[in-house]
Image (spheres, rainbow, N blue to C red):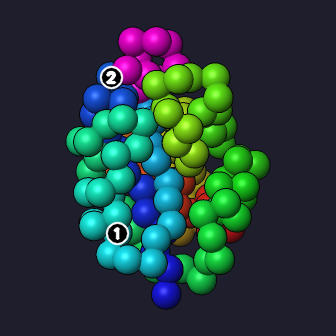
Amino acid sequence: MTTIFVARSVRLSKWGSDVGVSKHLFKLGVTEEPAKAAVAGGGWAGETDWALLRQREAEVLDEAEIIERLQRKTRMIDPKLYPKLKGATGIFRVPPEHVENHILMTRALAGESERAELKLKPADFADYLINNALR
């Protein structure tokens, strides 16, 4: 069975913030091997500090299909426009507002009426990406 995962690089996030893209950059990928091993050996965009945020087993054919599904909802950074990415596909810029709305809607549909202040964590962004990729 294949595993869909979301990883984050602190250095790539800092680069994104410096060039004005966004600091909320995440890599979505699909692997047959254990996700932790795939992320450790990834080296996407020339960075080696990738950390696995979330993973989920899924009935997915390939990474291109998942990326195409997610691009309908969230913008992927075009690797042709930024030489720093070195051709890496599946790196998404996620607006925090989309994640907040996703969490609020999920809570509302679950019947929770409290509106506690949201403090977004990288894992919340990963959940958002995986949920939208598997829809």
Q: Amino acid at mark 2?
A: Lys
In the rendered structure, does residue 58 fall within the stretch colored magenta?
no
The answer to whether any part of residue 115 appears in the image is: no
Closer to the camera in the image, 38 or 21: 38
Residue 19: x percent and y percent?
A: 46, 12
Closer to the camera in the image, 129 or 13: 13
Residue 107: x percent and y percent?
A: 50, 59
Q: Is residue 121 left or right of residue 17?
A: left
Q: In the displayed image of the protein, which residue is found farthest to the top? A: 19
The image shows residue 11, relative to residue 68, as above or below, that is: above
Q: In the displayed image of the protein, which residue is found farthest to the right? A: 72
Label 2 belongs to which residue? 14
Instruction: Specify start and end residues of the magenta stretch as a single range.
Output: 15-23
Disc 1 and disc 2 in contact, CB within 8 angstroms: no
Label 1 belongs to which residue? 35
Q: Is residue 10 left or right of residue 103?
A: left
Instruction: Kindly state the secondary structure of the residue where label 1 is placed.
Output: helix
